[in-house]
Image (cartoon, grey):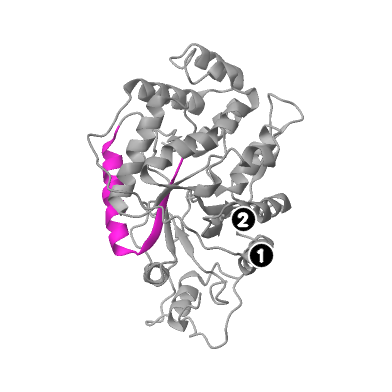
């Protein structure tokens, strides 16, 4: 399913630190922080139990 | 995969964000985007369908489901089979229960409440874990009896099935026919891990840990399963975030997704029918929540034994002198390596004090 460039840009901004598997589109908006401060990415230190409970 | 427009639908565990105070706006937008296209499905974890006692947390869980089902446009909602071993609502792992009239009635009651809360088709996922081969053989029929009053469906988790086949040396063809295949609306694939069993030297137990690539055998099961599940609508690849920390693991995940996508596309091009069951029930009548105090006591006792026993022998002795002895739980027949595995699972997911 096609996602908007704006949404893809926001996702890239949000998970920029972790994501490497996606093929980046050169036309996507460049991730940028509006006020210039470092992006705060909230880390979840608890292994996600959403799956893999086995 | 998102930027390449490969992801046709997403599954969201809507009850897994309880530790997060701030949900990123992009995540909510992603949910809305897929929901608007009816390509968002909900997958609960913590309802604990077979807990013997009806709890305030389950009431809250249903209220939360009612809210998120209003906010986001799910196509259906699912939960796991079993009860959570943890002492409180957000700890532990789902383990099996005896297949009795009492547990059947309890499960039907809870499933009807989930359907009432979301107003959507509801389904249950097959377990990765059993104590005996006989449990594996009876699981499909019990699932059918559970979901039929709500015209519910099954998630056929093929890696879960792969675990069961390996752990009990059972052939796929014999076991899969014991499942209500016409009720499979969703298939899961994933990877897992091998754990040596101290109680059975040389034997390795397969666990559904979702932290590795998808085995080739599971892809073969997928090719077969798609052909025999006439109401199949979704195929989902599951993976833990903690299993995607290296470049190699991320490449493997991407490769697995592509392989899944190729299989599904090939099957779609040859499909000669569309799913015919909407999995929506007739009007349901709910009465007071059922409870089974004896089952609840046994579950608490079992959870405590699994979470605290220092070794297999200690756990076995405790079980054989507990309220579960000589009951439908049939603890006397449990395979030693699966009791050992149940201890490992319960202690892995036990809430840290």
**Residue at 66% over, 54% down:** B214
In this rendered view, identify the residue nearer to me: A53 or B96. B96
Instruction: Give the side of residue B317 with respect to residue B166, left or right.
Output: left
B262 inside magenta stretch: no
Report the chain holding disc 2.
B
Residue occupying the point 44% across, 36% down: B145
Q: Nearer the viewer, residue B224 or B11?
A: B224
Image quadrant where one finds the C terminus of chain B? top left
Q: Is residue B168 above or below residue B222?
A: above
Residue nearer the viewer, B6 or B227: B227
Measured Cα–Cα span from mark 2 to mark 1: 31 Å
Is there any visible trace of residue B174 in the rendered image? Answer: yes
Q: Position of residue B68 (x, y in %)?
A: 31, 58
Label 1 packing within 10 angstroms: few (<14), some (14-19), many (20+): few
> Which mark is on residue B247?
1
Residue A18 x/y as whole percent: 55, 67
Q: Which residue is mark 2?
A: B226
Q: Position of residue B276 (x, y in %)?
A: 47, 58
Q: Please, which residue is most extreme toward the right here? A: B202
Which residues fall within the magenta stretch?
B54-81
> Image check: B170 left or right of B12?
right
Badge 2 or badge 1: first in the primary sequence: 2
Chain of the residue under label 1: B
As helix, strand or loop, the secondary structure at mark 1 comes to: helix
**Quadrant containing the N terminus of chain B in the rendered view:** bottom right
- Count of numbered circles on the image: 2
Q: Can residue B314 be seen at all in this image of the molecule?
A: no
* SS at mark 2 in the image: helix
Q: Residue at x 59, y 73 (%)?
A: A22
Rendering coords of residue B318 (x, y %): 51, 15
Residue B13, relative to residue B180: is it above or below?
A: below
């Amino acid at each position: 399913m096609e996602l908007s460039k704006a949404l893809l840009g926001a996702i890239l901004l949000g998970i920029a630190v972790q994501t490497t598997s996606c093929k980046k589109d050169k036309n996507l908006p460049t991730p940028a922080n509006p006020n210039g401060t470092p992006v705060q990415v909230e880390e979840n230190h608890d292994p996600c139990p959403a799956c893999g409970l086995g | 995969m998102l930027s390449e427009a490969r992801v046709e639908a997403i599954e969201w565990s809507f009850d897994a964000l309880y530790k997060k105070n701030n949900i990123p706006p992009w995540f909510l937008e992603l949910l809305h985007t897929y929901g608007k296209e009816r390509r968002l499905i909900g997958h609960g974890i913590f309802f604990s369908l077979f807990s013997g006692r009806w709890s305030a947390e389950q009431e809250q869980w249903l209220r939360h489901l009612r809210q998120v089902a209003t906010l986001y446009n799910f196509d259906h909602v699912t939960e796991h089979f079993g009860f959570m071993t943890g002492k409180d609502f957000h700890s532990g792992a789902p383990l099996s229960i005896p297949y009795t009239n009492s547990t059947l009635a309890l499960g039907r009651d809870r499933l009807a409440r989930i359907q009432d809360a979301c107003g959507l088709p509801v389904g249950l996922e097959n377990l990765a874990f059993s104590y005996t081969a006989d449990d594996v053989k009876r699981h499909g029929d019990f699932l059918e009896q559970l979901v039929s009053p709500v015209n519910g469906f099954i998630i056929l988790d093929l890696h879960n099935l792969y675990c069961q086949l390996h752990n009990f040396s059972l052939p796929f063809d014999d076991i899969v026919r014991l499942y209500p295949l016409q009720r499979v609306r969703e298939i899961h694939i994933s990877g897992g891990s091998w754990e040596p069993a101290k109680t059975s030297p040389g034997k390795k137990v397969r666990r559904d840990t979702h932290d590795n690539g998808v085995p080739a055998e599971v892809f073969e099961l997928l090719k077969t399963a798609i052909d025999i599940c006439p109401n199949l609508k979704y195929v989902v690849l599951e993976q833990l975030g903690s299993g995607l920390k290296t470049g190699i693991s991320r490449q493997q995940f991407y490769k697995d997704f592509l392989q899944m996508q190729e299989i599904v596309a090939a099957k779609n091009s040859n499909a000669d029918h569309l799913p015919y069951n909407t999995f929506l029930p007739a009007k349901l009548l709910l009465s007071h929540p059922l409870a089974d105090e004896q089952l609840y006591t046994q579950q608490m006792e079992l959870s405590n034994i699994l979470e605290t026993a220092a070794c297999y022998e200690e756990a076995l002795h405790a079980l054989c002198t507990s309220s579960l002895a000589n009951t439908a739980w049939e603890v006397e027949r449990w395979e030693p390596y699966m009791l050992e595995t149940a201890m490992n699972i319960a202690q892995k997911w036990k809430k840290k004090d």
